[in-house]
Image: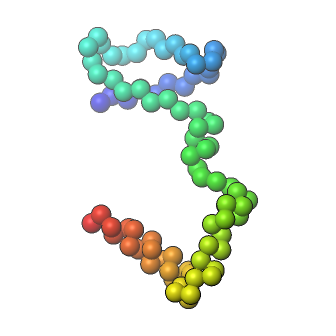
Amino acid sequence: MAAVHIEKVMEKDGEIKITGLPFKKGERVELTLSSEAAEASQHGIKASELLRSGLVGIWKNRDDIKDSSAFARQLREKAQHRWR
């Protein structure tokens, strides 16, 4: 599949016009749209948001977890090999 990269600045909300594409009638094409704002939101949360989320310290009162770092490593290792 040939790839064409076009960058446009939105001139009207919800509307974009693209002309001069090198594709012919009847060809199947795939269109993916992204914006800087959408890409920024996909990079996760800020450290301050993580601290407020309640996740930090979630294992502190678990009697069965002596070393939370080692426990986290074991979970990651299991997850990496889950589908093999």
Q: How is the image coloured?
A: rainbow
Near-viewer residue (70 or 21):
70
Q: At x 26% / y 14%, what residue is drawn?
A: 26
Residue 68 visible somewhere in the drawing: yes
Question: Residue 51 occupies which quadrant of the picture?
Answer: bottom right
- Whether 58 is drawn above or below 43: the answer is below
Q: Position of residue 22 (x, y in %)?
A: 36, 16
State left or right for residue 71 relative to residue 50.
left
Residue 47 visible somewhere in the drawing: no
Q: Position of residue 44 (x, y in %)?
A: 60, 52
Near-viewer residue (52 or 41):
52
Near-viewer residue (64 or 51):
64
Q: In what quadrant of the picture does the N terminus appear?
A: top left
State left or right for residue 30 relative to residue 15.
left
Q: At x 38% / y 73%, what residue is drawn?
A: 78
Q: In what quadrant of the picture does the C terminus appear?
A: bottom left
- Whether 44 is drawn above or below 18: the answer is below
State left or right for residue 79 relative to residue 66.
left
Q: How many marks?
A: 0
Q: Position of residue 57 (x, y in %)?
A: 65, 74
Q: Position of residue 55 (x, y in %)?
A: 63, 66
State left or right for residue 6 relative to residue 11.
left
- Whether 31 is drawn above or below 22: the answer is below
Q: At x 33% / y 69%, what residue is drawn?
A: 81
